[in-house]
Amino acid sequence: MKTIFDRTRMLLGADTMNLIKQKKVIVFGVGGVGGFVIEALVRAGIHTIAIVDYDIVDITNINRQIIALHSTIGRKKIEVMEERIKDINPAAEVRGYAERLTAENIETFQLQEYDYIVDAIDDVPAKLLLIQTTNQLNIPILSSMGTGNKFDPSQFRIDDIKKTNTCPLAKVIRKETAKMGIKRLKVLFSAEVPHREEMPDDGRNTPSSISFVPAAAGLLIASEVIRDLLFTAPVERTLFGIKLQGQKMKADY
């Protein structure tokens, strides 16, 4: 009988698919980047996923967010994303938190239960809080830097925060994590110089955006998460001709 993961199993094999199914991921932020991270992880076979976002869908989200449609305007992003996950995989276990991450509630998310954390938050204090906490708990995290005011998705890179350049948000995070004594932080960033043609009518410093940039960032993050989960797996198998033995191996894709 056909299943939703037949094509993926053909690529990775049944044992690897079972391994992916066992992993638990939590994603903070269900916006332009986070929505596509969640979408790709669920379609790749992640069975248990937690999603955190306090916001509602706005008409200005439609140009770039996978959950944003005219039919979802005004609804909580968490509710819309959870419905979408269940429509992709009805058996998925979804833990939704319609909350803003703060120092007062971070313990309620029980981060130690997860194999991987994705930071797609656009609030700097919350972002730093999550990064610092995961560092203390020694849980893998991938943090998204800025995708606003960008046009060229080919300039995205995944690297350590110390190797970032050009991105204004990365500059702030690089400085603050150094103060915290954080030695390593994997991030996605763009080397493209930020730009825009017009300023918002309301005078605020809202970033400009386009459909394919945050989407590309989200898909790159999801790819890195899956590969990290597989190539650090404590099992001895072969995937794409590479032996997995509990340490990170580099694959020539």
Image (cartoon, grey):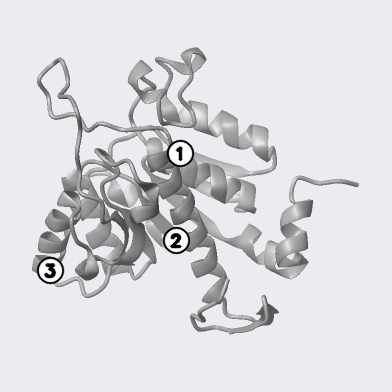
Q: Amino acid at mark 2?
A: Tyr
Q: Which mark is residue 35?
A: 1
Q: Earlier in the sequence, mark 1 or mark 2?
A: 1
Query: Can you tell which mark lies on residue 116?
Result: 2
Label whose residue precedes the other's in the sequence (1 or 3): 1
In the image, residue 107 sits, relative to residue 227, either above or below, namely above
Q: Is residue 30 visible?
A: no
Residue kind at label 3, given as amino acid type: Ala
Numbered disc in front, either 1 or 2: 1
Picture residue at 71% right of the left edge, 56% below the top: 8
Direction from residue 15 to residue 202 in the image, left or right: left
Q: Amino acid at mark 1?
A: Gly
- In primary-sequence order, the first of circles 2 and 3 is 2
Crowding at label 3, few (<14), some or many (≥20) Cα neighbours within 10 Å?
Answer: few
The residue identified by callout 3 is 178
**Residue at image coords 45%, 24%:** 68
Which label belongs to residue 1? none
The x, y position of residue 3, in whole percent, is 81, 46
